[in-house]
Image (cartoon, helix red, strand yellow):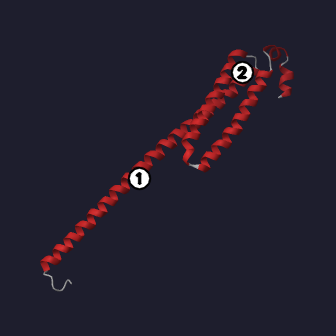
Amino acid sequence: MFESMSIKKKMNYLITMATVAIFCATIFVFWAMSNIESEYSHLRHNSMSAGFSVLKIEKNMNYVSRTTRDIMLGGDYQKDIEKLKSSIENIRKEFDHLKDIMATDASSLEMVKKAQSSTMLFLENSLSMMLSFSKEQIKNDAPTLYRKI
């Protein structure tokens, strides 16, 4: 087939094939780079958002610890109970946000659900323990209450 063609036609075929190959490679590279960019943006957004949620949960857990300690030391009972309830609700919202972020990753979602379950159990038990004490009990019977815990 190529024996009867002139050199000019052969060169034209070669140039056409090289142009088509370069054009296809360019399209492939453009598609791959745009796909990588969208994957990176998705990963960066999710990891940053999940990291912030975890930090907010940790901050609220520390605040719960300080608030329960303040209750046990005789601080403003009503104010501290409200702070405690508010912190628990904030933690619940952050776990819900974290579950929304992890919705596409089944193993991570399962881990978040387990963490939420154990954390909320701890928080609800802490709240119910604090609600079982009265302000007068804390003032008058502190040594007895500490022995219970």
Between 2 and 65, the one lying in front of the other is 2
Q: In this view, does 93 lie to the left or right of 8?
A: right
Of pointers 1 and 2, the one earlier in the residue sequence: 1
Q: In this view of the protein, can residue 76 be seen by the observer?
A: no
Q: How crowded is mark 2: few (under 14 residues within 10 Å), some or many (20 or more)?
A: some
Between 24 and 141, the one lying in front of the other is 24
Q: Mark 1 points at which residue?
A: 36
Position above or below: 110 against 131: below
Q: Position of residue 90 (x, y in %)?
A: 61, 28
What SS does tag 1 mark? Answer: helix
Q: In this view of the protein, can residue 117 be seen by the observer?
A: yes
Which quadrant holds the N terminus? bottom left
Q: How crowded is mark 1: few (under 14 residues within 10 Å), some or many (20 or more)?
A: few
Q: Which amino acid does label 1 sit on?
A: Ile
Q: Name the residue under label 2.
A: 70
What SS does tag 2 mark? Answer: helix
Position above or below: 102 against 18: above
> Answer yes or no: do the residues labelled 1 and 2 have beta carbons within 8 Å?
no
User: In terms of image quadrants, where is residue 84?
Assistant: top right
User: In terms of image quadrants, where is residue 23?
Assistant: bottom left
Q: Where is residue 101 in the image (x, y as percent from the top left)?
A: 54, 41
Position above or below: 79 against 16: above
Q: Position of residue 5 (x, y in %)?
A: 15, 82
Q: In this view, does 7 lie to the left or right of 31?
A: left
